[in-house]
Image (cartoon, grey):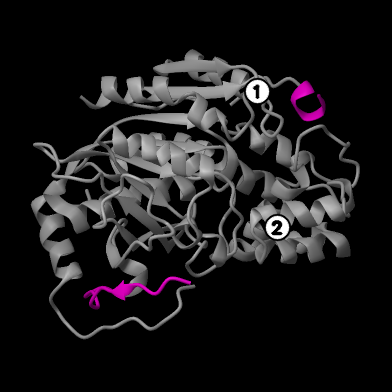
Amino acid sequence: MFVGEWARSSSEGIVDVNVRWLAKRHTLRRQSVLAVAVCIGGIVLTAAPAAALPDDMHPAGALLAEQPVTAAVLPVGAADTSAVIRYSTLRTATEAGESTGSVFLPQGAPPAGGWPVVSYAHGNVGIDDECAPSVTGSSDVEREFMQHWLAAGYAVAATDYAGIGTDGVNAYTDGPAAGANAVDIVRAAHQLYGDQLSDRWIVTGLSQGGHASYFAAHQATTRTPELDFRGAIAVAAPTHLDQLFPLAGPNFPSVPVAGIAHYVLYTLAGLDDGRPEHGIRQYLTPTGIGLMEKAKATCSNDLNEYLSAHPVTVAELFTTPLDSPDLRGVLDQMQHVPTDGFDRPIRVVHSLADTKVPIPLTWAQLTEMRSGGVDVEFQQLSGTDHAHTLTASMPESLDFAARVLH
């Protein structure tokens, strides 16, 4: 959660601006076949004044607070008027919450109509509050990625995801929630910057953020009808997790997917905190429970180092398989990436050399989306690792953005 107290002393300011802006902008209105080879082969924000509604009734994307970005977080080419914001959104697919994030503006005067917006959903950083990119800054690869967008004349709205810097544990791989986080930050950014931002926007993300981008694209037009959503770019995104995760259990085989226990632990931690009614602990060994608790308080790089020094298999985490009807239902709700119903074009990028998210997952996703009539284009790279797929595909992603946004 945030450090510091929230000032509630005035009826003027951000919330009043929010209300007037929303009124002005017409407010709030599987089957798959998958190759089995995939498995084997602290900031203190300046608070907005109190709103008339209780906290749990803020409309999605309501701006709750803002603070200037620190120098450590600010990418090259970003204006010093950029901000860290807190806004209302989803905590899980079914529960309201709050998220923080950064909004970076290009330097100089905005063009006529405002800067088009790129909503960026980051890759795995961990789920503890101190892992939030708005606090620590982005990875080198993701910072370079944002700098390319800023240099090309796009504002970047980068969510931290609910639970990373706000109450609760991040609902890791909960696509509807992460997608909403990536959509709602765009609405909140417009409340802060008004006409400096264009209504036109796209969403993109890496890995965990690529997964979120699919969900954001699926809900963007209906979730923010007052804005003009134009498309999505999903980079190195995992799909079909809803079919893979229920296989986790004491007999789960050793698989050549880098860091798989790492991702399982973060997902378990999110389920344990956000969906306690499912009793995830009953499926876990003492080792599994201990590592799940460690994952809640450990950022990604540190958890990787720990697990490298203390190796553990997925099988060692479990006493019982996760393949129960109630868990299958919640995992389907969280992780099943839509394969139809998209109303804007999607660009998908993946590398043959990706050892963290095997490319056959994306091949299966593409087949299903094309069967569902989705307007999708695909860029397949070779010799590029998981993270650098983001920057290696930058020229083609900029071309996609130019086509759909202008």
The residue pinned by badge 2 equals 302
- For the point 73% across and 20% down, the residue is 35
Please report the residue visible at 58 percent of the width from the left and 64 percent of the height from the top.
Answer: 169
Helix, strand or loop under label 1: helix
Left or right position of 11 against 212: left
In the figure, residue 230 lies in which quadrant? top left
Location of residue 176 with respect to 398 vertically, above or below = below
- The front one of 82 and 32 is 82
Residue 124 horizontal/vertical position (percent): 59, 47
In this image, 351 relative to 11: left or right?
right
> Based on the displayed image, in which of its 4 quarters is residue 32 positioned?
top right
Quadrant in which the C terminus is drawn: top left
Q: Is 153 located above or below residue 41 in the figure? A: below
- Point out the tag, 2 or 1, that comes first from the N-terminus: 2
Question: Does the magenta portion include 51?
Answer: yes
| Residue at horizontal 54 percent and vertical 33 percent from the top | 337
Residue type pointed to by label 2: Asp
Q: Position of residue 114 (x, y in %)?
A: 15, 41
Mark 2 or 1: the one toward you: 2
Q: To which residue does mark 1 refer? A: 359
Q: Main secondary structure of the magenta part?
A: loop
Q: What are the residue bounds of the magenta stretch?
A: 36-53
Camera-side residue of 382 and 266:
382
Assign a secondary structure to mark 2: helix
- Name above or below for residue 98 compared with residue 345: below
Q: Position of residue 195 (x, y in %)?
A: 12, 48
> What residue is shown at x 38% (from left), y 63% (from top)?
70
